[in-house]
Amino acid sequence: MNISLVPPPAPGEPAYAEINIAGEQAGSPLFNDVYFSDAGGYLESEHVFIQGNRLPERLARREEDAESAPGQASEGDRPREFVIGETGFGTGRNLLTLMKLLHDLRNQGIRLPEIHYITVEKHPLLPRDLEKAQSIFKNLARESLLFRSCYRVPVTGLQTLCPEPGVTVHLLVGDIREICPATRLSRPVDAWFLDGFSPALNPEMWSLSVFRELRRLSASGTTLATYTVSGAVRRNLNEAGFVTAKLPGYGRKREMTAGWIP
C-alpha cells in the first residue's frame, strides 16, 4: 500500500505532548484528560478496538476466502493487505494491543495479511515520555520494545516505521483537520480506531468534516469502533455515511459505539 500527503506539510517540530504519570494512570495536562486510567487500559483497547472491529476473525479468515478473483494476482504472488486507520496515536496502546493479537495469531499457525497502520497525532510524545507511558503495560512489554526500537523524535508530516515483519506504521503528525484532507491512499482503510481525547474536551477530532474525510478514505465494508457513545459523535458519523450501533462497553463504560459502511 502507498500513502502520501498532497500537498506535503512544511517540515518542522510539532508541539510535543506533555504527560503526567501517577501510578498506573497517564494524563494530558493540555486536554485535562487521560490517555488511560490504569494498566487495564490494555484490556479496554482489546475490547473496544480489536473486538469492536471484529479483527480476530477478519485477520484470520480462511486462506481460500482471501484468494484473488480469476485473472488477478494470486495470494502467493501478492500478499494480502489490511489497513487500519487511527485518530489519536497517544501512547501507542492500541498499536501494541494489535501487535499482541498478531503475535498470538501467528503462534496459532495463521497466515496473516500485511498490516498497514495509519495513525494521526497532533501532539506526539517524545521517546523518553513514550517509554515511561508504555512501561505501565506489563502485558505488552514485547510489543513496546519492538516499537520503541524504531521510534524516533517525530516531526511534522509522515514517518514510516517497521516495528516487526508484516507490520508497517504510517505516523501522520499534524492537525487532523489539515492532514486528513491531504492524505492519499492506494487502497481504502479496512477498520478505524477512533481514539481521540473526550469529544467534550477535543471536539475537533470528532467533527463532521473529519468523519467525511474518514469516509473518503474508506469503502463498503469498512468498520469503526470507539469508546464514546456521544450523541453528537454518532450523528456526525451517520451523516458522513457510517451506520452506527451501541455495543456493551468495558469496565465502568457501559456502552461503546461500533460502525460500518454499507
Image (cartoon, helix red, strand yellow):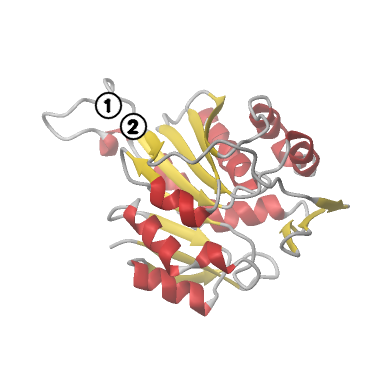
Instruction: Tell me the residue at 63%/35% (across/down).
Output: 154
Amino acid tagged 1: Glu
| Residue 92, position as x, y percentages in the image | 64, 43
Residue 86: image tag: none
Mark before the other along the chain sequence, 1 or 2 = 1
* Helix, strand or loop at mark 2: loop
Tell me the crowding category of disc 2: few under 14, some 14 to 19, or many 20 or more residues within 10 angstroms, Cα based.
Answer: some
Contact check, label 1 and label 2, Cβ < 8 Å: yes
Residue visible at 28% across and 36% down in the picture:
66
Q: Residue at x 57, y 39 (%)?
A: 156
Residue 31 drawn at (x, y percent): 71, 63
User: 151 or 112, which lies in front?
Assistant: 151
Q: Which mark is residue 80?
A: 2
**Is 76 on the left or on the right of 130, as rendered?**
left
**Viewer can see residue 24:** no
Write down the residue under mark 1.
75
Estimate the x, y position of residue 152 in percent, counting from the top left: 66, 29
Specify whether 23 is left or right of 129: right
Which quadrant is home to the N terminus?
top left
User: Where 242 falls versus 9 (above or below)?
Assistant: below
| Distance in Å between CA atoms under marks 1 and 2 | 7 Å
Count of residue discs: 2
